[in-house]
Image (tube, rainbow, N blue to C red):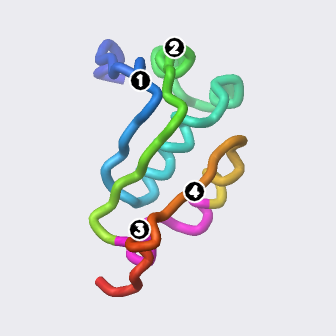
């Protein structure tokens, strides 16, 4: 990629993703999935190395609206739940079905 030299610090245990669509779910899955499994994908070597060095253990997905208005598909969410150790949590006050 054009920006392969761009490095993102992943030295902390927490990552925050802004947005609650398919891309957000994919990013969370990649950050939490064992690197051994990702090595078999088309993710480039620089990114794999960065993920190997990552200390991230917790990913928080922050959206403007509640879960009922989230833009991700059931398939994307299902893939995330297959990652060992992943647990979804939604604060009760965010469970409103209203816009």
Which residue corresponds to the image point at 54% horizontal and 32% vertical from the top-left?
Answer: 57
Inter-mark Cα distance, 4 to 2: 24 Å
Badge 2 marks a residue whose secondary structure is helix
> Which numbered dot is residue 88?
4
Query: Label 4: few (<14), some or many (≥20) within 10 Å?
Result: few
Indicate which disc, 2 or 1, sits on the residue closer to the N terminus: 1
Q: Which residues are magenta?
A: 66-77
Dot in front, 4 or 3: 4
Whether the residues at callouts 1 and 4 have beta carbons within 8 Å, the answer is no
Badge 4 marks a residue whose secondary structure is loop
Indicate left or right for 3 with 30 as reference.
left
Inter-mark Cα distance, 4 to 3: 16 Å
Dot in front, 2 or 1: 1
The stretch drawn in magenta includes residue 69: yes
Residue identifier under label 2:
53
Residue identifier under label 1:
12
């Amino acid at each position: 990629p054009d920006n392969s030299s761009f490095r993102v610090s992943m030295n902390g245990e927490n990552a925050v993703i802004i947005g609650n669509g398919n891309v957000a779910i994919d990013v969370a899955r990649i950050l939490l999935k064992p690197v051994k499994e990702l090595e078999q994908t088309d993710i480039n070597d620089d990114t794999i190395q960065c993920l190997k060095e990552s200390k991230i253990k917790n990913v928080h997905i922050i959206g403007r609206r509640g879960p009922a208005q989230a833009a991700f598909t059931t398939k994307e969410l299902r893939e995330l739940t297959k990652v060992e150790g992943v647990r979804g949590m939604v604060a009760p006050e965010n469970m409103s079905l209203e816009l």
